[in-house]
Amino acid sequence: MGNGYAIEVKELHKDYGDVHAVQGINFTVERGEIFSLLGPNGAGKTTTISMLSCLLHPTAGDAWVMGHSVSQDPMAVKETLGMVPQEIAIYEDLSARENLTFWGKMYGLRGDALRQRVDEILEMIGLTDRQKGRTGKFSGGMKRRLNIGIALLHKPQIIYMDEPTVGIDPQSRRKILDSVLDLNKQGMTVLYTTHYMEEAQELSDHIAIMDHGKIIAYGAHEELIKIVGELDRITLTLNMESAGVLDAWRALEGVKTVSAEDGTVHLFVDDSNLVLPHLFETANRSDVRITSVAIQEPNLEAVFLHLTGRALRD
């Protein structure tokens, strides 16, 4: 299998006893693209990426990375890829240069070739000036960038990035997103997992939305947005729970769906300008007060909400 794809996933499953962490997923990643797995925490993204990097053995199904089966030929798979794990994996007592040199030796690099590659990586991740400092004193963003550098030492064909911007400041996050785009411009295939809709939207050629171990939508950004069509999303909070007012809103012309969770109501409507006055009128008649209103045009969060009835950030 493989069929020229960078990654091909067929009916991949991972069970832990009665827990079905990944449930028969299928997708393909073209060579040279950025592909995002988008979904909330616990959706199965890390389990998927762990199977694709041969850290976990699938319960059923298989996947091919650069034509090599993860279940039949894991060593060949590992040689093609670099992995940036969710947890930072560096030796904090060592400097950035010492970390890169250690991992370079683990990849089989030696002598001048190793020194030259470490220099290139330090330049690429913007840590040349800080290369001798103990990494335990680095910021979270600097540690993340060093983690990315380690994954790139052996010039992999594909890089996996598992939630690489979690828990870091906005400036470091921006640098990491820019580095992903730069790597891709150089021809690198990137498999990226995130629960940040904006990241998937900015970076990706194709996106698979995961929830509860399944892929619930898959395609280019524009294709996914078409799932909710041209509908506007209105998010409201109310001063009290009221099933009556929700039913009344569902009956209004131009209202497509209404869902409520934890005091917040989400509506998908044809035209928010036309519908909004009627929402207030109906609430008034039910003695319910609308305490806040937010209106959004279609985005990936709206797609997730439309498909699951829940907000992506839960």
Image (spheres, grey):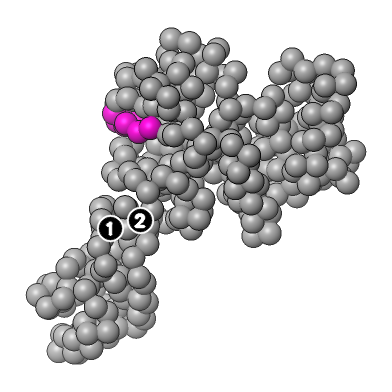
Crowding near the residue tagged with mark 1, few <14, some 14–19, many ≥20 C-alpha atoms within 10 Å: few
Q: Which residue is mark 2?
A: 222
Query: What residue appears at the point 71 percent right and 36 percent down from the top-left corner?
Result: 149
Q: Amino acid at mark 2?
A: Glu
Is residue 207 positioned above or below 18 on the image?
Answer: below
> In the rendered image, is residue 81 in sight?
yes
Is residue 248 positioned above or below 144 on the image?
Answer: below
Q: Which residues are magenta?
A: 20-28
Q: Residue 5, image x and y in percent? A: 43, 27
Q: Which residue is mark 1?
A: 226
Q: Quadrant of the N terminus?
A: top left
Q: Residue 283, image x and y in percent? A: 20, 85
Q: Residue 29, image x and y in percent? A: 43, 34
Is residue 3 positioned above or below 131 on the image?
Answer: above
Label 2: state its secondary structure. Answer: helix
Question: Contact (CB < 8 A) between labels 1 and 2?
Answer: yes
